[in-house]
Amino acid sequence: ASAMGHVMASRNPLVFDDLSANFAGRLTQEKHGFKARALIPLLANARSIVVLVVFDKRVRRFVDDGVLLTAFADQASLALEKARLLTEAETEQERADSL
């Protein structure tokens, strides 16, 4: 399974501080020069809706940025869920108005 699939299923972040040590990450590193990657699930109602992926061209530890990335992911999840609910409500209102 892919790293993104693992993050979606487990609902837990996955961090690669050095992609050269990761077989799956080597292709990305060689093609784009990325050295590190963090995958953070965006959750809505306790389910994964999408994965935020952050790359860096330096080998780095995302531990220091983990709280910030998780907070950003939480805010993005809330915004996406609110947009979904608004669209749902508008669709329902249009349906009710047409009746």
Image: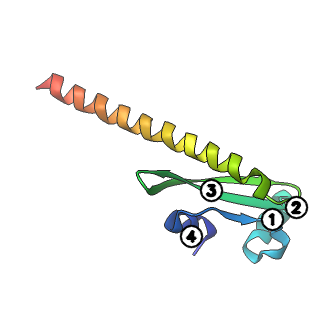
Disc 3 and disc 4 in contact, CB within 8 angstroms: no
Residue type pointed to by label 3: Ile
Label 1 secondary element: loop
Q: What is the basis of the colouring in this image?
A: rainbow
Could you give the CA–CA distance between mark 1 and mark 3, rounded to whole angstroms? 14 Å
Disc nearer the start of the sequence (1/3): 1
Mark 3 is surrounded, within 10 Å at the Cα level, by few (under 14), some (14 to 19) or many (20 or more) other residues, namely: many
The answer to whether residue 94 is above or below residue 82 is above
Q: Amino acid at mark 1?
A: Asp
At horizontal 76% and vertical 54% (from top left) the residue drawn is: 55
Question: Pointer 3: what residue?
Answer: 40
Provide the residue designation for mark 4.
6
The answer to whether mark 2 and mark 3 are in CB contact below 8 A is no
Estimate the spatial distance between the alpha carbons at disc 2 and disc 1, rounded to whole Å: 6 Å
- For the residues bearing labels 2 and 1, Cβ distance under 8 angstroms: yes
Taking depth in this image into account, of 79 and 93 the one nearest to the observer is: 79
| Residue at numbered disc 1 | 17
Q: Is residue 59 left or right of residue 45?
A: right
Give the Cα distance between marks 2 and 3.
18 Å
Earlier residue among tags 2 and 1: 1
Mark number for residue 59? 2
